[in-house]
Image: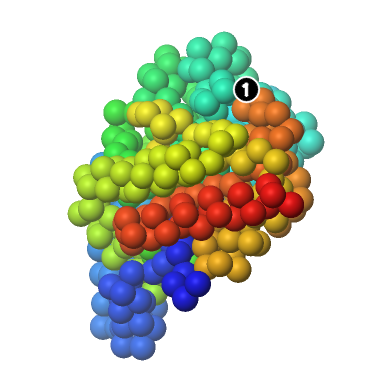
């Protein structure tokens, strides 16, 4: 196949031309240090300020509540560890779920090994946490609830506003949301949802890799992970990654303009792909919520009788790029912790692939990809 079809947009996205232009300009022309007092430094500072505004607008935050960092993993670690370190002298309890991204799950597991109490909430068969379980898990020692907005493997949308409403009755509990898979794609009013901390990643919205942000609601106390300079309001030391920040700002501004169309356009691509697969193949299980409980850009399918890794390699050879799960641990030959938490049977765990879409995909690509997948599965089953 001459044409390559990229359906792994939950792992990363292709940078937009406007983003590349912005990054190049910040590395070759406007390359000053924002902390420098001269004209070039002030110009770079203005770019950072504008990027902060662009990120803030998407979630209805104030620019001064946006703090740049290296990406979603750092933002999640910073939110969790920075909250816990504020309360080191007290017994601390964390509530999270069994289906979180590894950057949240492993951070909580390490803290548990260090003596902190952690509750890992179960999910229903669609991968969604019951807000009532959150409420029941709260104790006098609870200091943090950390939940993702959109699951990176199945697209399940967690009931963030409902949990936020519950936590309004517990003002001492900080609410962190991993928004890496939803930022710029799904609307979320950060203040009305009761969220204190919200993680963002640039390369999930056609921005650069190595840049992200953490929303910190005004008045929320957070300890830095890095010490040194006074950058980012004394919360994140180190010279700002101005090219990355500028690229994220450009990507965020573009995503904001298209967010109203994202669900409709990308959702139609996903639904078309699913329908074409199910029309050609039997013994296919849909692991993603397909209604309002699921994000429009993620589709997880299990192909019975197939090893997902084998199918992935066959598709790659035919120009179709997909994933077996989170890119952070997809090279390990191990069942997905997310799909395991859904209670899937072994045959469904072994044959699960994630297809994730973007506005750069076309209906022609979707049709060709579905045909190729169906042919590959049929071929493997015939062996």
Relative vertical location of residue 108 with respect to residue 249 in this rendering, above or below = above
Coordinates of residue 180 in the picture (x, y in percent) = 46, 48
| Furthest residue toward bottom | 28
Q: Going by the image, does 231 lie left or right of 143?
A: left
Residue with the mark numbered 1 = 122
Coordinates of residue 154 in the picture (x, y in percent) = 52, 38
Relative vertical location of residue 366 with respect to residue 298 in this rendering, above or below = below
Q: Going by the image, does 111 lie left or right of 296?
A: right
Residue, x 42% and y 44% (percent of image)? Answer: 276
| Furthest residue toward front | 382
Coordinates of residue 215 in the picture (x, y in percent) = 40, 46
Judging depth in this view, the residue of 348 and 56 nearest the camera is 348
Residue, x 31% and y 36% (percent of image)? Answer: 188
Residue, x 62% and y 41% (percent of image)? Answer: 303
Judging depth in this view, the residue of 124 and 195 nearest the camera is 124
* Element type where label 1 sits in the image: loop
Residue 314 appears anywhere in the view: yes
Coordinates of residue 221 in the picture (x, y in percent) = 47, 39
Judging depth in this view, the residue of 327 and 108 nearest the camera is 327
């Amino acid at each position: 196949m001459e044409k390559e079809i990229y359906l792994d947009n939950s792992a990363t996205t292709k940078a937009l031309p406007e983003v590349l232009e912005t990054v190049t300009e910040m590395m070759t022309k406007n390359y000053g240090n924002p902390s420098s007092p001269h004209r070039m430094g002030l110009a770079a500072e203005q770019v950072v300020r504008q990027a902060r505004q662009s990120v803030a607008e998407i979630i209805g935050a104030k620019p001064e509540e946006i703090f740049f960092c290296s990406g979603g993993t750092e933002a999640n670690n910073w939110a969790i560890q920075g909250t816990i370190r504020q309360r080191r002298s007290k017994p601390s309890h964390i509530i999270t779920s069994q289906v979180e991204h590894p950057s949240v799950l492993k951070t909580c597991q390490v803290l548990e090994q260090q003596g902190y109490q952690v509750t890992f909430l179960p999910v229903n068969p669609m991968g969604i946490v019951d807000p009532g379980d959150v409420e029941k898990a709260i104790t006098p020692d609870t200091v943090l609830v950390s939940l993702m907005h959109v699951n990176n493997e199945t697209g399940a949308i967690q009931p963030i506003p409902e949990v936020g409403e519950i936590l309004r009755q517990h003002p001492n509990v900080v609410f962190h949301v991993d928004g890496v898979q939803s930022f710029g794609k799904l609307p979320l009013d950060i203040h009305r949802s009761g969220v204190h901390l919200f993680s963002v990643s640039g390369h999930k919205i056609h921005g650069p890799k190595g840049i992200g942000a953490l929303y910190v609601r005004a008045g929320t106390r957070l300890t830095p992970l890095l010490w040194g300079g006074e950058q980012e309001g004394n919360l994140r030391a180190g010279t700002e990654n101005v090219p990355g920040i500028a690229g994220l700002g450009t990507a965020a501004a573009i995503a904001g303009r298209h967010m109203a169309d994202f669900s409709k356009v990308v959702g139609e691509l996903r639904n078309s792909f699913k329908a074409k697969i199910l029309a050609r193949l039997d013994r296919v299980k849909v692991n993603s919520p397909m209604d309002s409980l699921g994000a429009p850009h993620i589709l997880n399918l299990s192909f019975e009788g197939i090893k997902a890794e084998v199918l992935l390699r066959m598709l790659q050879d035919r120009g179709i790029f997909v994933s077996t799960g989170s890119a952070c641990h997809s090279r390990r030959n191990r069942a997905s912790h997310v799909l395991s938490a859904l209670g899937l049977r072994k045959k469904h765990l072994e044959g699960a692939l994630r297809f994730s879409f973007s506005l750069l995909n076309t209906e022609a690509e979707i049709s060709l990809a579905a045909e190729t997948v169906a042919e590959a599965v049929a071929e493997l089953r015939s062996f």
